[in-house]
Image (spheres, grey):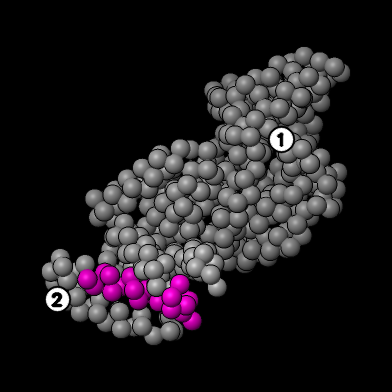
Amino acid sequence: MTASEVHRAIEAIYRIESAKLYAGLARMVRDIGLAEELAQDALVTALEKWPETGIPDNPGAWLMTTAKHRALDRLRRAKLVDRKHAQLEHEVQQATTPELDLDDVGDDLLRLVFTACHPVLSPEARVALTLRLLGGLTTDEIARAFLVPEPTIAQRIVRAKRMLAERHVPYEVPRGPELDARLASVLEVIYLVFNEGYSATAGDDWMRPDLCEDALRLGRILAGLMPETPEVHGLVALMEIQASRSHARVGASGAPILLLDQNRARWDHLLIRRGLEALDRAVQLGGARGPYALQAAIAACHARARTAEETDWVRIAVLYAELAQVAPSPVVELNRAVAVAMAFGPEAGLELVDALIAEGALEGYHLLPSVRGDFLVKLGRLDEARVEFERAAAMTRNTRERDLLLERATGCKDA
């Protein structure tokens, strides 16, 4: 292999191994920022040595051993307590063996997940830190994915690590009553990443598939680490089923294709099967009424329908009513209005949407006038529908979505 080929191989290996490195080192030094520095020091050493010595048989163990030796050097220079010193020396000896304890790796990754998604951080900081530490994305990749300047993402990550250190956030998996609240934060972060990939809030692309894949990978890892937790499987089920439609959601020109107009032959049936299996697992574990499991059950109704006409909209409306009880929100009510309109007619859906408007809910949310416009079209009230589509187009920051909404507004004029 040439030196450049070795460097590319090292970068690929590091991306695969980095989360385990950060997790193991953070457990040892109790500082995520320092753990990342130590791991990157090991990467630099690998870039210097491997072109000459060749890539070791167990590159992950080599990187971990090198990083732990760096940690020992730092601790010695800092003259930390002998007990910690001895503990690190013992861990370095363990790391020199080619076999890694998979249980330890899993525990370390769980600690890293719960720390990166700690509620003391803002949602934006949690997303950036999680993608950096667990997703293996560079700062530049995260910035490009979210259409944010790279310095902004870099600042979020630095501030997040500083906040965790200043607040003395324990590097641990929460126990007892705290676990549910903290797990909700973890699941929220993963689903935020997925949603940004599935329906981009801004920019020229309707979807960003790489973000969907990152979120799915994180969800699958978490399901493997917490196999008895139903809502984790509910989230994975939801993402798998939604991701199955990705190829059918965009036309050849990049224009969005709405759910009822999609060619279902282009749906990924492997992902659908995985999603349904994950949903079954969530139900078997007693989590059928979890918020993500309920949303997955709704997605499953679409996945099981061979054609749009076969969709069980009554069942979907019932599931949305259950979701509104478990996790009430104006967005859930808006989605319920769509299901009710499909099941019982546009007048019934319009009544629910107008109630949301009267409450002042979802002000500035472009999908509210978009949905209302759709109901008005079905009722033959085209002039009113055109106004709603134009209002929705003015609200969205996504170019593809804006074009679609303006096209629908023009259609109301021409009809």
Q: Quadrant of the C terminus?
A: top right
Q: Is residue 176 magenta?
A: no
Q: Residues within 10 Å of mark 2 (few under 14, many from 20)?
A: few
Would you place residue 39 above or below residue 352 in this image?
below
Asked where in the image residue 237 lies, by quadrant, the reply is bottom right
- Give the side of residue 27 with respect to residue 16, left or right: left
- Please state which of the two labelled residues, at mark 2 or mark 1, is closer to the viewer: 2
Q: Residue 317, position in %: x, y?
A: 71, 42
Q: Residues within 10 Å of mark 1 (few under 14, many from 20)?
A: many
- Give the side of residue 79 with respect to residue 229, left or right: left
Q: Residue 202, position in %: x, y?
A: 58, 34
Asked where in the image residue 370 lies, by quadrant, the reply is top right
Q: Residue 22, position in %: x, y?
A: 38, 64
Asked where in the image residue 153 lies, by quadrant, the reply is top left
Would you place residue 365 above or below residue 317 in this image?
above
Residue occupying the point 34% across, 64% down: 41
Is residue 383 shown to the viewer in this render? Answer: yes
Which mark is drawn over residue 45?
Answer: none
Q: Nearer the viewer, residue 127 or 388?
A: 127
**Magenta stretch: helix, strand or loop mostly:** helix
Residue occupying the point 44% across, 84% down: 99
**Badge 2 is on which residue?**
82
Q: Which segment did they paint magenta?
A: 51-73
Amino acid bearing label 2 = Asp
Q: Quadrant of the N terminus?
A: bottom right
**Badge 1 is on which residue?**
338
Q: Nearer the viewer, residue 305 or 403?
A: 403
